[in-house]
Image (cartoon, helix red, strand yellow):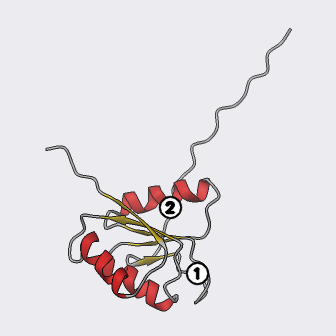
Amino acid sequence: MTSATVPPAEAPRLRPLGEPNVFDSAATPGADAGVLIVDDDLFQLQLLQFQLESLGVAPVQACNSGLAALAWLERHGGAATLLLLDLNMPGMDGVEFIRHLADRRHRGAVVVFSSSDAR
């Protein structure tokens, strides 16, 4: 009896995301944007976007600041079903961003997360 050798799966690679402020903003105005990730850490943005897309979630948009995310939401009619939001960001932090969402009567779900380096 012979055993078949299964080649190891090649590790998926993170794809380059392009511009530094708003990534993959291909959704049409008024269309459901799916998920919008807001985080100042480029690695976290890429990782979350990759993980969600690997699970078949689409479309996934990513912004590296609260200001960029508000601008993206404004351009796309506030269309984001789910926002993944970093709490600790320079400039506009997650709490201030949520206040802006409330002022705009955002109707999507918001997940707030945060990470910090070991000290």
Is 28 left or right of 64, judged from the image as shown? right
- The quadrant in which the C terminus is found is top left
Residue displayed at 25% across by 68% down: 89
Rendered view: 64 above or below 106: above
- Which of pointers 1 and 2 lies earlier in the amino acid sequence? 1
- Residue 43 is situated, as x and y percent measured from the top left of the image, at 38, 58
Residue in the image at 45% along x and 60% along y: 46
Taking 6 as reference, is 92 above or below it? below
Residue assigned mark 2: 49
Q: Amino acid at mark 1?
A: Ala
Residue at 60% over, 70% down: 59
Q: In the image, is 80 to the left or to the right of 69?
A: right
Left or right for 92, reference 33: left
Picture residue at 28% right of the left edge, 53% below the top: 115
Q: Is disc 2 surrounded by few (<14), some (14 to 19) or many (20+) residues within 10 Å?
A: many
List x then y, in percent, for residue 57: 61, 61
Q: Are marks 1 and 2 in contact (CB under 8 Å)?
A: no
